[in-house]
Image (cartoon, rainbow, N blue to C red):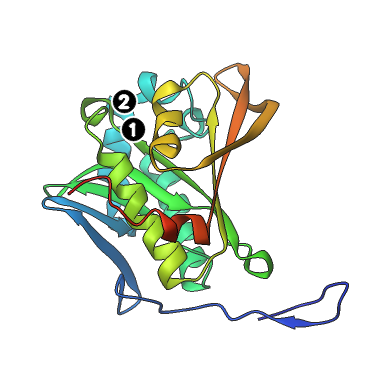
Amino acid sequence: ARHAGDAGDLEIRQPTDAGSGVRDGMFSRTVAPGIEIRLFELKDAEPVFDTVERNRAYLREWLPWVDFTASPDDLRRFIARVREQFSTGRGPQCGIWIDGAFAGSIGCHPIDWPNRNCSVGYWIEERYRGRGIVTRCCESMLDYLFDELGLHRVTIHCGVENARSCAIPERLGFSREGVTRDGEWVNDRWLDLMAWGMLEHDWRARRVPLHP
């Protein structure tokens, strides 16, 4: 892909089938025994919607899309968009699967290839919180983004008061970079957002895994 910039045209290589996580255009990674992250498929719309329905009150406290997810058709449209995102080399949006059952999501917002960066988001259903599952899934996704796609920077944005969500980038060694006041309208209120950042050399320097 070619991108015009102040210094002239710059060619940015965008991997379309990078790394061991991609097979026949499908992305998946085994995170731990019984835990997998996998690119969403249209057939996932029903189980994802059922999980959102069971956890709606819990999820809507921090996530703006929950109130706009009223049927499996809403999720089919979302899945179609994120599959197109992946097929055009802009990064995966995945389900978290525990013992074969859908339990949450992790993925990157469209990659900014000229600057080799993206942001990552995640959620997991209430019954699985506090078990370190999202942290492990983030580790796996970050390994893919930095080591296999060659990104330079990844960010995570969390509600300042969402202690559980903020604990994940902190545990992973992200740097706290600042607060965006009233950064997002969620559940009839403004949320301040904490920005967390990780650079490729810092990720590689912390190679000791959090989980043996």
Helix, strand or loop at disc 1?
A: helix
Q: Which residue is mark 2?
A: 55
Q: Residue at x 51, y 64 (%)?
A: 85
Q: Looking at the image, which is closer to me, 98 or 165?
A: 165
The spot of residue 135 in percent (x, y) is 32, 41
Determine crowd level at label 2: few under 14, some 14-19, many 20+ residues with C-alpha closer than 10 A.
some
Helix, strand or loop at disc 2?
A: loop
Q: Residue at x 47, y 22 (%)?
A: 162
The spot of residue 137 in percent (x, y) is 31, 49
Is 195 on the left-hand or right-hand side of 73? right
* Three-letter amino acid code of the residue under disc 1: Val
The spot of residue 86 in percent (x, y) is 46, 67
When asked about the image quadrant of residue 49, the answer is top left
Q: Residue at x 36, y 20 (%)?
A: 58
138 w.r.t. 6: above or below: above
Is 59 on the left-hand or right-hand side of 192? left
When asked about the image quadrant of residue 59, the answer is top left
Inspect this view and state whether residue 38 appears.
yes
Q: Which mark is residue 60?
A: none
Q: Which residue is mark 1?
A: 52
8 w.r.t. 111: above or below: below
Residue at mark 2 to residue at mark 1: CA–CA distance? 5 Å
- Dots 2 and 1: beta carbons under 8 Å? yes
Q: Quadrant of the N terminus?
A: bottom right
* Three-letter amino acid code of the residue under disc 2: Asn
Q: Residue at x 30, y 70 (%)?
A: 21
